[in-house]
Image: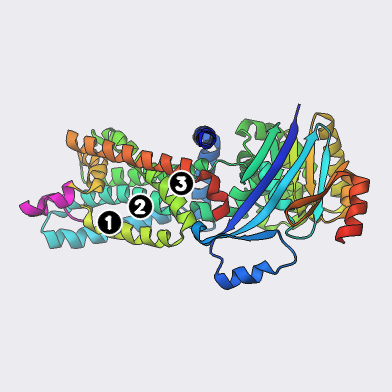
Amino acid sequence: MADETAGSKARNEVALAEIWNGISRWEFWLTLAWTDIRGRYRRTLLGPFWSVLNSILFISILATVYSLLWRIDLGTFLPFVAAGYFVWIFFASCIGECCSIFHAYGETLKTMPLPPMAMLVRVIVRNLMVFSHNLLVFVVIALCLGMPLAYVPLALPGLAFVALTALGLGTALAFLCARFRDFEQIVQSLLQILFYISPILWLEKLLPEHATWLAQLNPIYHLLRNVRDPMLGSIPPYSSYFAAAVVTAASLAIGLWAYLRFRDRLAFWL
Amino acid sequence: MSYITADNVSLDLPIIGAARSFRSHLLVNKVGGLLRVGSKAENEIVKVQALKDLTFRLERGDRLGLIGHNGAGKSTLLRVLAGTYRPTSGSLKIKGNVMPLLSLGSGMDGDFTGYDNIMLYGLYLGLSRQQIAARTREIADFTELGDFLSLPIRTYSAGMLLRLSFAVATSMDPEILLVDEIFGAGDASFYVKAKHRMETMLEKSSILVLATHSVSLITDYCNKTGVMQKGQMAFFGPTAEAIEYYKKHIL
């Protein structure tokens, strides 16, 4: 028994060193993330503008329809939807892509001396690149509508919470999906549901009094607010920062646990 | 001073998703490792005993050839040495930086050019951008691919990919080089170059482990040879004796 504990302690130390190694290989994940983005729109005429075009189309049509539905002025609703949607897409793409990254690079992970951690960071970083691109689109929308942009830099701490939550949760899900492929499908449908039950296409103040918990208990709502509120020109409440910090810490803890527990078996699942 | 010491290294590979009928089918197979059927307590996962009690030691200048049937465990052993598979039991001590060259195209992107892929592959191998940039010229020269390096590598033949991967992997004077069967894709002029480069490499405290089916490649390159059979090292020793054993017992 004592031997076994010593063995698992040594294994944990190796895994921790590897996590750190993966995080510190910034040249790898930065270059590969950028290569991924370049590769995605390779040989298309519009290149990355496809992503801009897609989101502009989605945002403008949905914002128009829903502003009629909720009887809200489009000028205030459009930036609300745009900001929320961009943050959501960032989070959902990180999670969804983490679920498939180990399979996608199965052969590589079995034959190259690369810490799987570096792959997960690469997923988060490439989506951060897409988000910063989308942020520019948002700034253009905001400028056209004459909105104040002074608070936008305050979105950064909120974004850090979203990114770290996605990294922690994504790590745990990446291992789970590598072992049980069904979870990739499950995660996709859960993400879809989460999109509709989170206040992205609707304002939380539209909720009746007895149903405000629907937003308050949704971790996505708090993560979202800390980025969206500053983008729209207000400061999120402390309670949202607190909730986001708790969610982030819990996600990172789950991710770390999964990494230490399943790292050694990963290659056998691919 | 680099070395590899393997002491009773064993590896059980769980085969996930193997159906019951598939399992019974596997049991009577002639080639491949020894199959172990997990008990009910192990959730009925089929396990292949891919490596069994391997014990050997390699020191500076050693060039080990691995030979044996398909599925005898050559590639699995290379993956264990590369650190991507962790042994189930036994101890493995490796000193020196390991450079694996185990599959063609891993760590590369078919739609990017040869030059782009020198960078990508180097980053996968753990080199820094600066290290790679400083050696790009030399790597390009070694490949002799010339203008092809400006084309997407999906247009390359296996031999061209091998030239590219080999040039990057050996550009940093690795202390331990692991090469899998992919070596077969090279042409005669590549072998001459590769052999020359490995000889210079091996002078600087290096170790080579090469898995192949080609007896002539082994006699050319290796001073020691391991004959593998069903996950075990049936014979380990000087190449001449090992080849004799291989021809007599395995072929």
Separation of marks 3 and 1 at Cα, in angstroms = 20 Å
Q: Earlier in the sequence, mark 2 or mark 3?
A: 2
Quarter of the C terminus of chain B within the rendering: bottom right
Separation of marks 1 and 2 at Cα, in angstroms = 9 Å
Horizontal and vertical percent position of residue A173? 41, 51
**Host chain of mark 1:** A
User: Does mark 3 fall on the same chain as mark 2?
Assistant: yes
Whether residue B103 appears in this view of the structure is: no
Q: Is residue B190 left or right of residue B100?
A: right
Q: State the residue at coordinates (17%, 46%).
A: A216
As helix, strand or loop, the secondary structure at mark 3 comes to helix
- Which residue in the structure is indicated by mark 2? A92
Which residue ends up furthest to the left in the rendered image? A209
Name the residue nearer the viewer: B215 or B192: B215
Horizontal and vertical percent position of residue B40? 51, 61
Q: Earlier in the sequence, mark 3 or mark 1?
A: 3
Q: Amino acid at mark 1?
A: Phe
Separation of marks 2 and 3 at Cα, in angstroms = 12 Å
Task: Count up the numbered dots.
Answer: 3
As for residue A168 lying within the magenta part, the answer is no
**Disc 1, disc 2: CB below 8 Å?**
yes
- Which residue in the structure is indicated by mark 3? A123
**Host chain of mark 3:** A
Horizontal and vertical percent position of residue A223? 26, 43
**Host chain of mark 2:** A
Q: Which residues are magenta?
A: A201-216
Q: Is residue A106 left or right of residue B184?
A: left
Numbered badge on residue A195: 1
User: Does mark 2 fall on the same chain as mark 1?
Assistant: yes
- For residue A114, which quarter of the picture? top right
Quarter of the N terminus of chain B within the rendering: top right
